Amino acid sequence: MQDALNLSIGLQNEATLLVSLGRLSEAQRAASEALRLATEEGDEEAIRYSHSRRGWTASLSGQLGPAALYFALANALEKKMFGEELCSGRGVWWAELLLRSGHPALTTRRTKANLRICERKQWNEVIACCHSMLGWCALAEGRLGDAEVELRQAEPVLRQGQILFWLARLHVTAGDLALARQDAPGALDRAAEALALAAPRGMRLVHADALVLRGRARLLEVQADSPARALDDAEEALRLARDCGYAWAERDALFLEAETRAAFSARHDSDNASAATREREASRRARADAEALAARLLLSEEDLTAADAKALEWLKDWAKNAKK
């Protein structure tokens, strides 16, 4: 029994590492096997952890329906065991899904609840991740000053603790904040920081995000070679994202490609009509692909409610079977 449970825990940790390396399919397999072993042993804590990892991996892969269900299952167990919603790193992963899929206000509320729990338990590293998530939420809602405050609280803790995956992600968020303020040099600095952490360590998800950030900053610079350099970033980010199965960076890279090709088209309008037409058509195709993907990367309130209902039904069945 203990060997199976230890193996489940090892697979959960392996899944987390694989996510940071952008090996999402392998991470999902590891988390699923961890869940199988935990379920066989009837260990609710390991089941909860495994569902959370499956949810995080599925959300990064763009499988939003399954991700919502996996997190709802983990949350139902969390409430059963402790009377609280998902907290710690599991709560941060869940918050990421909610924010990315269009629910910044809900994400803020749940992250603040997670933060209170983490502060009570003095989980300093997760406290920093919560502040980073709150900064991301504030940015999504256009509260730029609040975003800066939250990110400033998170950064020194992540840096001192050498929490490099989350520190690199924070640099990307801070770079997006700089872009929102039309600060191209600031965004480029943050992109360079993120790339310096991500590229040599094989953290391909953050690598792709940082390339998109750098490309957007280059377009904002409006230098003579800005479109060409931004297109290089878009194409490399798209390659990485598709290799990892990272839906969010694929979407963002396609939008960046559309912007850069539109810039090329505008540049050629007066001197090369055929080149302008080619770039305009390439921009249209990239934007259409980006918009089609973006439309799939949303969860409605009804989707979340349905996931919660399925999780409660599962919990009832689980309790019945446990009594047998």
Image (cartoon, rainbow, N blue to C red):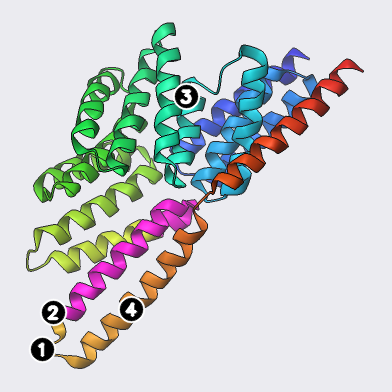
Q: Is residue 255 magenta?
A: yes
Looking at the rendering, the stretch of residues picked out in magenta corresponds to 239-266
56 to the left or right of 99: right
Q: Find disc 2 in the rendering and name its residue.
A: 267
Query: In terms of sequence position, does the residue under pointer 2 or pointer 3 come before the other?
Result: 3
Q: Find disc 1 in the rendering and name its residue.
A: 270
At numbered mark 2, what does the secondary structure look like: helix, strand or loop? Answer: helix
Question: What number of labels is visible?
Answer: 4
Seen at 42% across and 54% down, the residue is: 241
At numbered mark 3, what does the secondary structure look like: helix, strand or loop? Answer: helix
Q: Amino acid at mark 1?
A: Ser
- Distance from the alpha carbon under mark 1 to that under mark 2: 7 Å
The quarter in which the N terminus is drawn is top right
Query: In terms of sequence position, does the residue under pointer 2 or pointer 4 come before the other?
Result: 2
Query: In terms of sequence position, does the residue under pointer 1 or pointer 3 come before the other?
Result: 3
- Distance from the alpha carbon under mark 1 to that under mark 3: 54 Å
Q: Please state the horizontal and vertical placement of residue 314, each as a whole percent of the image.
A: 76, 32
Query: Which numbered marker is on residue 282?
Result: 4
102 to the left or right of 276: right
Q: Is residue 151 above or below residue 269?
A: above
Q: Is residue 8 visible?
A: no
Q: Find disc 3 in the rendering and name its residue.
A: 89
- Name the quadrant containing residue 149: top left
At numbered mark 4, what does the secondary structure look like: helix, strand or loop? Answer: helix
The quarter in which the C terminus is drawn is top right
- Name the quadrant containing residue 105: top left
